[in-house]
Amino acid sequence: MSLLARARDWLDERFHWAELIAPLKKKTVPVHKLTPWYFLGGITLFLFMIQVCTGILLLLYYRPGANEAFESVQYIMTQVRFGWLIRSVHSWSANLMIFTVFVHMFSVFFLKAYRKPRELTWITGMLLLFVVLGFGFSGYLLPWNTLAFFATKVGTQMAGSIPLVGKWILIFLRGGEEVTGATLTRFFGFHVAVLPGLATVLLATHLLLVQHLGMSVPPGVERRIAEGKEPARSMPFFPTFLLHDLMGWYAALGVLGALAAIFPWELGTKADAFASAPAGIRPEWYFVFMFQTLKFLPPKILFLEGEFAGLLGFGLAAAVWIAVPFIDRRAGFGRVTRFFTGLGVFALGYITLMSALAYWH
Ligand code: HEM
């Protein structure tokens, strides 16, 4: 008996392995020309796992505190063996993950995967997107360098422009009136405890729903199958789809490894609250479209502060986007709603255009 067969028998005797994977063997994944988009969620998951592992390694040396944070990151980069690589992988992977989560969101949007019965999958996905952006925002400050310090000042200031609750949000985020060591401790708490807790619950729900409901078939493909123009094809989830998924992870690892090794993540200079803000200060690329929009707005729009009107607009747009599965009720079996496809194209175009304008300026 081969070693592999013996290992399988051993597992089966103790853990009823065959029973455990039976549901996975029964599960199938639709095959059509849009199937590659099904791999984006898996790649995001892979990058998330990289974040957890490298984040734990960084925690072994990182010290939160205005007098220690920058020095501890400097120590990681210069003294700890492969510390620079771990930090570089963590930072690059965070950016790649935010990119893939956006691609995943837009792809499930255009495939109309949010249609009944997947409303909750969409909502947990949107909550995950906010959590992922929260990870980016809170993590950016942790090295306590000049750029991050001033970007956090600007970012939290924006929240402060909201009438009534703005001041409260600002103090809650900063842990006081100004960005200080208290802000850093607070952001550290969000980054390593609050957000990971939320992400675990949301991710478990999202993945359980995906497993339970199976992958959706886009309406266009459904129609072609119903009209007999295309055969209904599928592949087993285990092991075929999982092996395909693994290839996606392998490709992502290749890109990540190359970026992290060729372009090590920089540290910059230590934050100095008394220094003047460097020119051209702007947030991370995934917030830039909002930042640029606010810059274009006049100081007053009707009776509202320009900045607040902009934030209100983004809040309303986000609310509509979350509620899409409940508004787009006409999208159904074989039926695409062009209005919502147009809405997605508009959102994607707007984000791209505003970000491009910000970098071009
Ligand atoms: C950390 C973030 C996320 C992770 C790790 C994740 C992971 C996954 C995985 C592994 C799948 C199954 C494979 C696939 O269809 O790609 C999936 C499906 C899905 N995800 Fe996500 N996701 C995340 C964020 C989001 C976001 C932001 C949205 C949209 C708002 C979303 C909506 C969906 C939907 C609707 C499906 C079902 C697709 C279908 O049935 O065809 N997810 N997700």
Image: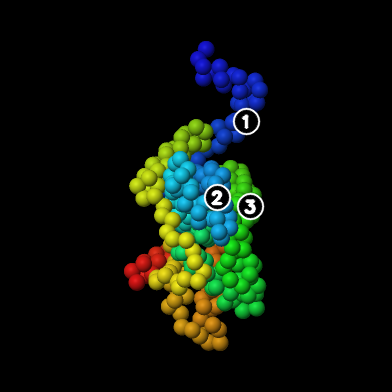
* Mark 3 element type: helix
Quadrant housing residue 183: bottom right
Instruction: State whether residue 213 is above or below residue 326.
Output: above
Q: Nearer the viewer's eye, disc 3 or disc 2? A: 2
**Residue matched to label 1:** 20
* Mark 2 element type: loop
Q: CA distance from mark 3 to mark 2?
A: 15 Å
In this view, the residue in front, 57 or 167, is 57
Instruction: State whether residue 30 is above or below residue 269.
Output: above
Instruction: State whether residue 183 is above or below residue 42.
Output: below
Identify the disc placed on residue 193. Answer: 3
In this view, the residue in front, 360 or 55, is 55
- Compare marks 2 and 1 and give the one earlier in the sequence: 1
Q: Residue at x 46, y 37 (%)?
A: 246
| Residue 327 showing in the rendered view | no
**Residue matched to label 2:** 62
